Amino acid sequence: MREIKADKARDAAADLAQRANFVLRKDVKDALRMALAKETDQRARKILKAIINNAEIAKKEKLAICQDTGLPVVFGEIGQDTRITGGSLRGAISQGLQLGYAQGNLRRSIVKDPLSRGVSGFIPAIIHTEIVKGDKIRLSLLPKGFGCENKSQIRMFKPTASIEEIKRFILEAVEKAGPDACPPFVLGIGIGGTQDYAAFLAKKALLKNIVHSSPPAVHRLEKELMKDINRLNIGPMGLGGKTTCLGVNILSYPTHIAGLPVAINISCHALRSAVKII
């Protein structure tokens, strides 16, 4: 049994809070550059150049990539051979996020009461934990801005639904998101499980590298969706162009014989996440 002090988790969360908000993921930046190389619409090219330049300045100057520094979503993979000492893991993560957001001068975006609203702050975050093999803790932070989060959708299909019906639902969701979710997008899609688990999978799918391997049927669906979405001509920031979508990431899970949940989580072009292993 390996002992890990809660302070280490706190420090890791503080580091992730700033790294995720200051440094755009390499796969996302690479996808933006590839989109720029293929784009022919001059206005779209200008926007893509501005997005890439913004990311480079944010990294250099340690500034937020986007003014919406999001609601922090943490995915924690906890090795079954670890034991947390000196405090609780959830408490340490929350403390670290508050520290990192404050030190990084990141926006206070969270209201503790969703109905009465009130004064905004840095926490609480959304924390998902999973017990895995090993003696390490892997923390992944996804700061989720709400311009795109507000465009999330879920539908409980009948088990007889066709792939075309599912694709149509996803395309309609992207069309409805339009410029409001700051395209070009990355789509996280969860298929299967229960209603809540499909939504979880859709969010977790955004952690996957844009260039990734998938089972053949899933890979084919990802490619078809990418092609169809980019034909919508929504374009960067909704002003037209070839690039509406940078990537489609699908995670699936077994489900009940009587159902077929499908969830969509849209990310704007500033898809931010960072990982730390303790």
Image (cartoon, rainbow, N blue to C red):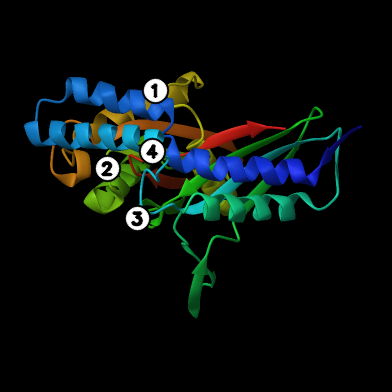
Q: Residue furthest left?
A: 42
- Circle 4 sits on which residue? 61
Tell me the amino acid under the disc marked 2: Pro
- Circle 1 sits on which residue? 220
Q: Residue furthest right?
A: 1
Closer to the camera, 162 or 274? 274
Classify mark 1: residues with Cα within 10 Å, few (<14), some (14-19) or many (20+): few
- Mark 3 and mark 1 in contact? Answer it, CB < 8 Å: no
Instruction: Specify the quadrant that holds the C terminus.
Output: top right
Tell me the amino acid under the disc marked 4: Glu
Tell me the amino acid under the disc marked 3: Gly
Quick one: label 3 or label 4, which is nearer the N terminus? Answer: 4
Closer to the camera, 220 or 88? 88
Numbered disc in front, either 2 or 4: 4
Above or below, comparing residue 81 to residue 108 in the picture: above
Classify mark 4: residues with Cα within 10 Å, few (<14), some (14-19) or many (20+): few
- Circle 3 sits on which residue? 147
Q: Is residue 143 visible?
A: yes
